[in-house]
Image (tube, rainbow, N blue to C red):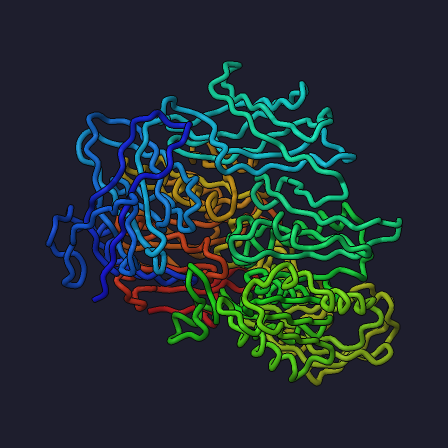
Amino acid sequence: MRRLFLALALLAGNALFAQDGYVFKEGLMSGPCHQYGRTALFTDQLAYAFSNGSLQAPTNGSNSFDGEHWQTVTAGEDGAFSGKALTNGYIYVTYNSPKAQTAILNIAGHSMVYVNGVPHAGDMYRYGWMFTPVQLKQGVNEFYIRTMKGWGRQGLRAKLTFPAQPVYLSVADSTMPFIVKGKDNSGLWAAVVVINTSDKALKGLQIKATVQGKTLTTTLPDIAPLATRKVGFMMDASAAASDHNSVALALSSQNKVIDHKEMALKTVNASEHYSSTFVSGIDGSVQYYAISPQLNPGGKAPALFLSVHGAEVQAINQANAYKYKDWGVLAAPTNRRPRGFNWEDWGRLDAMEVLNIATQEFKPDPERIYLTGHSMGGHGTWILGATFPGKWAAIAPCSGYPTLMGYGSADGLIPDSPKNNTEEILLRASNPSNTFKLANNYKAGGVYILHGDSDRVVSVDYARQMKKILANFHPDFSYYEYPGGEHWYGDTCVDWGPLFSYFKWHTIPADSSVKEIDFTTASTAISSKYHWVQVLQQQHALAYSRVKLRRTGNNVSGTTENVQVLALDLKDFGAGDIVLDGQTIKYNGGEKVLYLQHGAQWSIGKAPADTDKGIVRNGTLKEAFNHRMVFVYGTIGTAEENAWSLNKARYDAETWYYRGNGAVDIVADKDFKAGDYADRGVIIYGNATTNKAYSLLMKNSPVQMSRGKISVGDKNYTGDALAGYFMYPRMDSKIAAVAVIGGTGLKGMRAAEANQYFAGGSGFPDYMIFSVELLKGKETEVKTAGFYDNEWKLSAKDEISN
């Protein structure tokens, strides 16, 4: 069995901390023993032992997993541990605390860590600004740090520090706007991190932000005990007249200042590249986007270019790579982080949020909207282009890979095909990521493929693969391999003259001029509309739905696959025949929208009920993490169950912050009132026995979980080692959903701690029930999984049982 070691050493000092600290220099290593990725299935031998209560403190030479042994590991002279063996395992380190106290743990290069059995999020991309409050007990404290594949060569470091004050500001990971001369700078949003090392929730904190004598005060949301939270605040920079400005921040509680910081502000002219901030509808956090403004605007509606960045590229640097265009403005969203979600899931939502904001701000010509991007942004271009046909006059992927099935990243690949029925159901939830299956959607506009022929990061073979696919059906695409071009050969690899000339030739056609429709979607809640056709409901959720129609005068004919309800926008149609799948439906005219229902045969019907599956809610577990989600932990279980619930909610919040530059409310069930969180997604941690919010929101769900039992329809599963991930719509909302993350007992709850649902493109169905034995790699321990039908009822045709 291959080996793993992770080693830890001192990180650079930080003025936020007192000078005393503890550097981890020695430990024990073992592995590989885990495999996580972009799927609901995972393996983790150490987590299995921990969940089962069989994990014993290791010693040098003691048995670890599958006959392997723990081995001593020591830091190098540079204070870091590195090496090829640093792959998919754990390192065990300890700290002997003279007293019970809180500390700040800072590790870089790991995927997560158990601190005295409590899970905390990792810093897998080595950003260095994850300062995690942890509770230490008097005596020996144990840390099991999970390592990843391929990161050992970069070194891993960690340190415990002891803060001089219980609550303070951290500006190492801030989100700040530019001051743009000539624009309204009186109400700019920004964000910094508040760290709460106390065991009490913080309520009513305020930040006063002062710029050139003008002060705005923002009351902050609650901050959970032993937690970090990135918080938004407003500032008035309207008096900032010079090129050198700063903002003074004062964090206060009950009108008493408890910390303060000062930060420089970037000031630019309106004709220069700049960053703007906004409050995201996804979670209420502050995000930013970058703009390359139009050169010498002449009053005519500009074109709009949406440019999506590559991995580890900031949006402002993406915008800076482009020279100003005299015929359009360029907007660069963030994907929530430089790596974020690979432009999948919430990265996709971020891109569309910024597209909407830029459209409102710059009022572009609606026929001249274009999409491009480089590397991971090349993938973003492929996936956004296939997902939203009709929104782009043309797209231009540069040095990009088409899917996470063929390329992947630090989170691994999405498997390209299922090995069994269990994987088929689980992978179906990843269907929206499969650009190959959505490729016919590229016919909606032009495609320009640009790739360096010497690219060793993203092989030119990916471009050639897509060229071959498009050649089978696309009437209008262009392809260019840049001679000698590596992955990055300067700004030319995005700001390429012929690419923008190609854009200039293309416009989005009016709906009335589109005579042929060929549209595929995997989820109506993600993508449902193409010109005058909209798929409102599917027969089988998350399977591919395809509509191929031809319009001749007032007559429409064609075929459908996996479509339950179809809407045709007929505002410019007269009376005629509609022929679907060989069946003729007479249309007498007069309807703006015609709804067609597929039963035994097609018939004229009506729009689905708002409460049904459709274009707003179509299921999968991840859907509940939209709409300003709130995490609700339980307080009515045993002390151990309650502690697990809070710790798991905090772990997910830490992960969301790290991956998505996000923030989330963490609320005790006893404080949760549905009316206070109207139309918001809710994540319930625990089960019906341990969490009071469960009975408020999940009483009608066909999946029920309580202590010792899970029922899925008439199937019952018993014991304390079962875990569940499942969702259900909020019946008091037309948009929001609820998810339950928990188990039937402590064993099952601990088995549910994995949160790879935050990995971009990972697929989770509507419900999934499994036992702790899944952690040993036994896929048959997925007891059942599946998708509800359109009325949110169990569907035997869309589930598996083992």
Q: Nearer the viewer, residue 441 or 265?
A: 265
Drawn side of residue 664 relative to residue 272, left or right: left
**Which quarter shows the C terminus?**
bottom left
In which quadrant of the rendered image does the N terminus lie?
bottom left
> Splitting the image into 4 quarters, where does residue 219 fall?
top right
Picture quadrant where residue 541 is located: bottom right
Residue 390 visible, this orientation: no
At horizontal 62% and vertical 47% (from top left) the residue drawn is 316
Please tell me whether residue 116 is drawn above or below residue 34 in the rendered image.
Answer: above
- Left or right: 723, with 615 as reference point: left
Q: Which residue is pictured at 56% across the width and 62% down the height?
A: 488
Image: 777 above or below 332: below
* Closest to the observer, 155 or 407: 155
Q: Position of residue 319 (x, y in %)?
A: 66, 51
Residue at 30 percent across and 64 percent down: it is 781
Q: Where residue 189 sits in the image (x, y, percent)?
A: 63, 34
Q: Is residue 595 left or right of residue 87?
A: right
Rendered location of residue 584, percent (x, y): 75, 82
Q: Is residue 92 visible?
A: yes
**Depth check, front residue: 579 or 715:** 579
262 w.r.t. 66: above or below: above
Q: Which residue corresponds to the image point at 63% horizontal and 51% vertical from the top-left?
A: 333
Q: Toward which corner of the image does residue 322 lie, by quadrant?
A: bottom right
Q: Position of residue 99 (x, y in %)?
A: 21, 25
Please tell me how many numbered marks the rendered image carries: 0
Give the farthest residue toward the left. Answer: 61
Viewer-side residue, 82 vs 314: 82
- Whether residue 712 sits left or right of residue 773 in the image: it is right
